[in-house]
Amino acid sequence: MKAEGVWFAGPGRVEVRPEEVREPGRHEVLVRATVSLISAGTEMLLYRGEIPTAEELGLDRPGRAGTYPFPVKYGYQVVGEVAAAGPAAAYGVGTPVFAVHPHQDLFVLDSRPGVNKGSSFVYPLPAGLSPERAAFTNLYGVALNAMLDAPVRVGDCVVVSGLGPVGLFLARMARPVAGRLVLVDPADTRRAAAAAIGADAVVSPAGAADAIGDASDGRGADLYFEASGAPPALQAAIAGTGQDGTVVVVSYYGTRRVDLLLAPEFHYRRIHLVSSQAGRLNPALTPRWTMPRRVGVAMARLRDVDLDLVSHRFPLSDAALAYETVDRPRGDVRGVLLTYGGTR
């Protein structure tokens, strides 16, 4: 069968190339894509040529292909429908699914639960979850993973830096528990989009220090999530966190240099710096928490997220323009989707 998939041909170069797709085997399903989401994090680092090593690409996973650093086929959040299924497949024809696979209109995956080191490549969508909202399953999982690494305590002063989808999800999860919530982003359009969350302050980086001081009665943040992906924001997070507080680094900076001044705040305030890497669960929570459980929780909660997550939609044929849109330094860009089947 013929298909088309997105490849990174070089720094800033995206091509839609023809693919050959076989019939599904005994435990496999053939997925026909409906929509897929471009990640503004790791995926865009690869697009720019800012991934340090080949190991981070996981080229041994189904659908991913190529040679480090380029050309490479990479991605991990596609929503579609089972078009054909092997005799022992976990899901039947017509089942709507979320798939861990690069952007491609037609592809085959093993449907067995836990086939990927306890995780899976295909998950059925729960009733009531739209394909566009389901495309954010992985990004909600990133935010959920950070919350599992450093949960919000009742009454905490919480700061979230970076109001892309991951930051919005973190803020949404923190709001019911946090005593005070401060949201930070340089783009006025993103700050406006976050207003529905009901934070105590939504400010630009220039106004963050004063807002955190007011919200914490001068103590500094108890918990500060850095989800902006901007290296200077990590220094601001350390400066804005109080005595024995915690900074959770949700962002991945790739090859970009992160220069930190650790005195006096980091040392004298005994600040805890936590790396929240979405590919691993908090070991203190396993085996009770697994990747399939995280995916299930993300999907269930996405149905109730009352946020405007999608800013742009492009057909697969316009994938190069879609990546250029994500890469441009404009605050009106939130979730950027690729659509399949002639829809836009």
Image (cartoon, grey):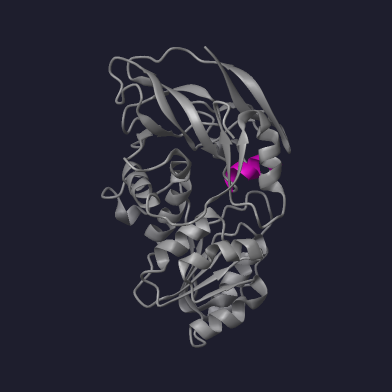
Q: Of 86 and 129, which appears nearest the observer? A: 129
Q: Position of residue 76 (x, y in %)?
A: 50, 37
- Left or right relative to 109: residue 8: right
Name the residue at the front extreme: 343
Q: Of 110 and 342, which appears nearest the observer? A: 342
Q: Of 303 and 259, which appears nearest the observer? A: 303
> What are the residue bounds of the magenta stretch?
41-49
- Left or right relative to 185: residue 141: left
Above-or-below relation of 242 to 2: below
Camera sees residue 51: no
Residue drawn 51% across and 26% down? 63
Q: Position of residue 15 (x, y in %)?
A: 69, 28
- Left or right relative to 240: residue 301: left
In magenta stretch: residue 18: no
Q: Main secondary structure of the magenta part?
A: helix
Above-or-below relation of 290 to 218: above
Name the residue at the bottom extreme: 217
Where residue 116 sits, quadrant-wise, is top left
Where residue 82 sits, quadrant-wise, is top left
Above-or-below relation of 6 to 159: above
In magenta stretch: residue 44: yes
Q: Of 45 and 215, which appears nearest the observer? A: 215
